[in-house]
Amino acid sequence: MNFKEMLGKELLFIDGAMGTMIGKCDVLPEVLNIKEPERIKKIHTAYLEAGADIITSNTFGANRLKMKDYAVEEIISAALKNARECADKYGKLVTLDIGPLGALLAPMGDVSFKEAYDVFAEAVKCSKYGADLISIETMTDTYELKAAVLAAKENSDLPVIATVSLDKDGNLLCGADILSVISLLEGLGVDALGVNCGFGPAQLNEFFGLIKKYASIPVALVPNGGLPRFENGETVYDLTADEFSDFMAGFAKGGAHLLGGCCGTTPEHIRLTKEKCKDIKITPPVNKNITSVSSFGKGVIIGEKPVIIGERINPTGKKKLKEALRNNEIDYLLREGINQDEAGAHILDVNVGLPEIDEAEMMSKCVFELQSILSLPLQLDSSSPEVLEKAMRIYNGKPLINSVNGKKVSMETVFPLVKKYGGVVVGLTLDESGIPDTAEGRYQIAEKIIDTANEYGIDKKNIIIDPLTLTVSSDPQAAKETLRAVKLISEKQGVNTILGVSNISFGLPQREKINAAFLSLALQSGLSAAIMNPLSDAMMAAYDTYNLLYAKDADFKDYLRKYSEAPKEEKKASSELSLRDLIVLGLKSESYAKTEEMLKSVDPMTIINEHIISALDEVGRGFEAKKIYLPSLLTSAETAQNAFAAIQDKSPKKEETGEKILLATVFGDIHDIGKNIVKLLLKNYGYKIIDLGRDVPPEKIVEAVKAENIKLVGLSALMTTTVVYMEETIKALREAGLSAKVMVGGAVLTQEYADMIGADFYAKDALASVTYAKTVFGA
């Protein structure tokens, strides 16, 4: 079989769950590749006999962060050897299975992007032992997902399938929506994308329509066998194999291209799915022609409603910003980003080009810090390909790249970067001869840029043309020709257009009036995106009224929401921001000094209760309402930690008096992302955390609860195969006569499941654990 030749032309079937078939075992499932190879081969064979076209190597957790007692190469080579031996007998394919690291990447955690890449690359290099393709699965963080895909693309020539796990709202743990995931993966050049794990096909059905709406490449759907519940000491799922396969046949009819099963599925699920799909004709993938950029938290479509790109993080003509860049004062740039976000920008331009600083280092630093607190996509703005590459590599999402131009050397250096890392690139209509005076001349350069990009494999939808705004003070015809160029390029090439609007008024008084008028004319000419100042009332009024008058503001909702309200209070200057403000905004480098200053006149407990805890509660409510995302939540928590540190440093040294909470990931489970998030939040609410780590046996938890006189225990598990140890741990605590309350959490858990295993509380997210702790301790 040839995967690439068949993909999108024939319906392909992936196997079902490995962990479900293995069941309970005393070692990590991946170790069975070496210790019990016949047991693993028997499972592979069962799926092949059921009709699977692709079997998955037993390597979900085979990385050096999880398997410190084994050589990764030893595990993966044995796994691929086992799978290869079975697949060859049936003429089928083997995919190298790569799961998540089990640790959070910075800024949410301690693992750097480079370290994550290196860990994934080590696993990918083992594909030489018999893989036909690579499957990256169960990802919940776009940054980790990007590291894994880059590792796969740069260290092998094999096709790549990438699937993510969604929550009940259709988002990833990091906050990414479906559009942002698809934008990222298609930009990186995977061969197929989709969803696995998380829930069953009934719940997945809610999001299938969105996936089909945005995806231009083959779609893989690999749901669980329903929702889990606990019966007679075993994990079972609420769908039969027959019911599961009915849903899967519906996905095939609806346009899916690869079908398989995750937790709770068996060879029978795959056999029935293939049987019910045998007469279904596949729907080939169709290019959706959607121009989109993304961050870790949201995708933005360019070409529907006009897009505002905030221009203020650019040192040109900005004395204070230049000074901040020279002095490495990143928080000044962060505040500019926050202000533009609140003012209505959809994308932020980031330009840090000053000759006296290291632009590449500063650009990467600013991108990382901005993405720690804001979910807006970024426009990476530099004339240096080296600066762009460094920033594109560490950018979390699919960026807007500014820019390429019609010069041969520019296209030869920038287009390979866009092809490798993904992105939408801005094409400036200038070349070796300069900027043409006429719209027709600029159109010709736009055509050259588009045609050359196509030679590099860059689709027209990933190009935005900038016909260039020249100041009218030096050429009275400049505005007219630019507007003609916007209209000509939009209509004849069918691509999106972008302009730096404010350039029109250089050298003239009352610039804001000119800028606003020009923006209105440009939007009427078909402009897709405007690089502008969203803090300008005149500019925003021009933008808002255009959308209202051109029916781009459904039911006038945006206009009425904005202009029917009472005028907002004038924004505080940075020096006026309270500690509470700093925590909510996530300005972590300022909270320590602010707290020190407050301690001169304010009681520490007042600071804690009225500023720190109050701010964390506000952030928590925003997170719960999906108004902020996990990276921002954790950055606010870190900002609060800095404030706590200032209080501790200035207070007399004494023993910690906070109530103690014990946390652990249960036996057999080596994932602790959720536990670590809970730990961080609980610590910020003043609790003393005893963290036993991961893969913790029940007896060790019992011993620690006794020794520390623990009143509240938090247990975490990610995998269905390890949730059973939650019940065993709870049972062991009860049999030992301990009265500690037990809260449980994890991706596979539900309220019903928590009730069945005897837990006192089901923590659906990290914030819920804080709420329950307050209940337990009477806070």
Image (cartoon, rainbow, N blue to C red):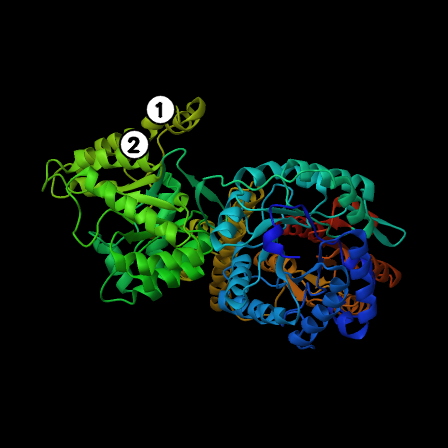
The part of the image, by quadrant, that contains residue 497 is top left
**Label 1 packing within 10 angstroms: few (<14), some (14-19), many (20+):** few
The image shows residue 435 at horizontal and vertical percentages of 17, 47
Q: Which quadrant holds the N terminus?
A: bottom right
602 in relation to 356, above or below: above
Q: With 580 as the anchor, is 412 left or right in this view?
A: left
708 in relation to 238, above or below: below
The image shows residue 696 at horizontal and vertical percentages of 75, 67
Question: Element type at marker 2?
Answer: helix
Q: With 62 as the anchor, is 325 left or right in this view?
A: left
Write the residue at 80% across / 48% down: 271
Q: Is residue 670 visible?
A: yes
The image shows residue 492 at horizontal and vertical percentages of 31, 35
Tell me the distance, in whole angstroms, between the alpha carbons under discs 2 and 1. 10 Å
Q: Which mark is residue 442?
A: none
474 in relation to 641, above or below: above
Question: Element type at marker 1?
Answer: loop
Question: Which three-letter amino acid code belongs to the residue tagged 1?
Answer: Tyr
362 in relation to 617, above or below: below
The part of the image, by quadrant, that contains residue 472 is top left
Q: Is residue 591 visible?
A: no
Question: Which three-letter amino acid code belongs to the residue tagged 2?
Answer: Leu
Q: With 73 as the anchor, is 390 left or right in this view?
A: left
**Label 2 packing within 10 angstroms: few (<14), some (14-19), many (20+):** many
- List the residue tagged with mark 2: 523
The image shows residue 541 at horizontal and vertical percentages of 30, 30
Answer whether labels 2 and 1 touch (C-beta < 8 Å): yes
Write the residue at 70% across / 38% down: 280
The part of the image, by quadrant, that contains residue 38 is bottom right
- List the residue tagged with mark 1: 550
Write the residue at 27% across / 38% down: 536
User: Mark 1 or mark 2, which is nearer the start of the sequence?
Assistant: 2
